Image (cartoon, coloured by chain):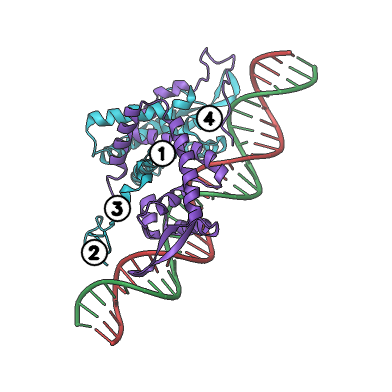
Chain colours: A cyan, B purple, C red, D green
Amino acid sequence: MTETAHPTARTAASPSAETGIERLYSAELANETEFLAARARSVGSRRANEDLASLDLKVRSYSVLSLACSGLNPSQRELAEFLFLDPSQIVALVDQLEKRGAVKRKADPRDRRSNIITPTAAGRRLYAQASAVVQAAGEGALSALSPAERDQLRDLLRRIAFADQA
Amino acid sequence: MTETAHPTARTAASPSAETGIERLYSAELANETEFLAARARSVGSRRANEDLASLDLKVRSYSVLSLACSGLNPSQRELAEFLFLDPSQIVALVDQLEKRGAVKRKADPRDRRSNIITPTAAGRRLYAQASAVVQAAGEGALSALSPAERDQLRDLLRRIAFADQA
DNA sequence: CCGAGATAGTTGAGAAAGTCAACAGTTGTA
DNA sequence: TACAACTGTTGACTTTCTCAACTATCTCGG
């Protein structure tokens, strides 16, 4: 071993720093915002999924539960559009949460085609726990940034995440 | 492809608002950095995939091609780790690109287990085109940000994207 | 030198996620 | 009223993810 630029790669004495792929950080790809956003999401959602597993949730179901608990009374179609998911996937997610007793499909009095997704009392409790877990995980992932930088990142991301909706 | 072309689905029953989904922007979820990163990635990669389709590429194969052309001589294992993909997926991606004549598997003289992925001349030309396409698409997605803000976003993302090397 | 254990790439299976087309019930409108 | 559009739903199909083997190779301790 001791390859060209591989100062670290020894046997698995140390758990994490053995990778030695830091040399790829200098690749052009590592400067493309798109790639960085994808990787940031991978880092974050992997972590969040692991932590949410203790509550039998994933980021997808957590997102739906969160919006159900938002007080904004989203319909399934709105959930699909907001989460960039196919309406058929929302069906499955709501099915799961409903079977579990966390949310309910409520008829929209103004449009009987729509289902308004609302949380049950148990759903609210579940969301409270999940929200705490996600927030803790987020803190960990963002620990490299100062509070001011986190706010800045949120603002910048929000502007590109919701840009095409105007 | 399907760009979810629902420009304005205003329903008369709906109260005044245009698309009606903007009200969800105020949801708690829309303030979580993780969610914003996921959505930003969705916006960006959807766009990039559409544009790369003209070259018969996807963001995944583009990423591999880009790293192959980086001059850093990545191995498949390094590609897997850097792109957060399973080694078996790298096999498929390299197979495609190799069959297409864009990259080659080269034996690593120091370790005959490893394959070093290098581009062919055609691969370099393909990457030049693809890179231009992706950059143009990225500009579109980032058009809401000033150049200084884009740099800032890149820096912030890089710090969290490469923060924990799980 | 040699065998034990680890690593790189490969294959294949199965789960999860994404995509798409069709359908019924409902709504708005010409 | 007839027609077009929309919502949720189902089902088929493709892509992506995850994991467990297997081979060939490497490293290391004895």
Q: Which mark sits nearer the N-terminus, 3 or 2?
A: 2
Residue highlighted by disc 2: A10
Query: Helix, strand or loop at disc 3?
Result: helix
Residue highlighted by disc 4: A76
Residue A84 in the image: above or below residue A14: above
The circle drawn on residue B91 is: none
What's the residue type where badge 2 is placed? Arg
Q: Which mark sits nearer the N-terminus, 2 or 1?
A: 2
Residue highlighted by disc 1: A34
User: Same subunit under labels 1 and 4?
Assistant: yes
Query: Helix, strand or loop at disc 4?
Result: helix
Mark 4 to mark 3 CA distance (whole Å): 45 Å
What's the residue type where badge 4 is placed? Gln
- List x then y, in percent, for residue A149: 25, 31
What's the residue type where badge 1 is placed? Glu
Residue highlighted by disc 3: A23
Mark 4 surroundings within 10 Å by alpha-carbon count, few (fewer than 14), some (14 through 19), many (20 or more): many
Q: Residue at x 53, y 30 (%)?
A: A76
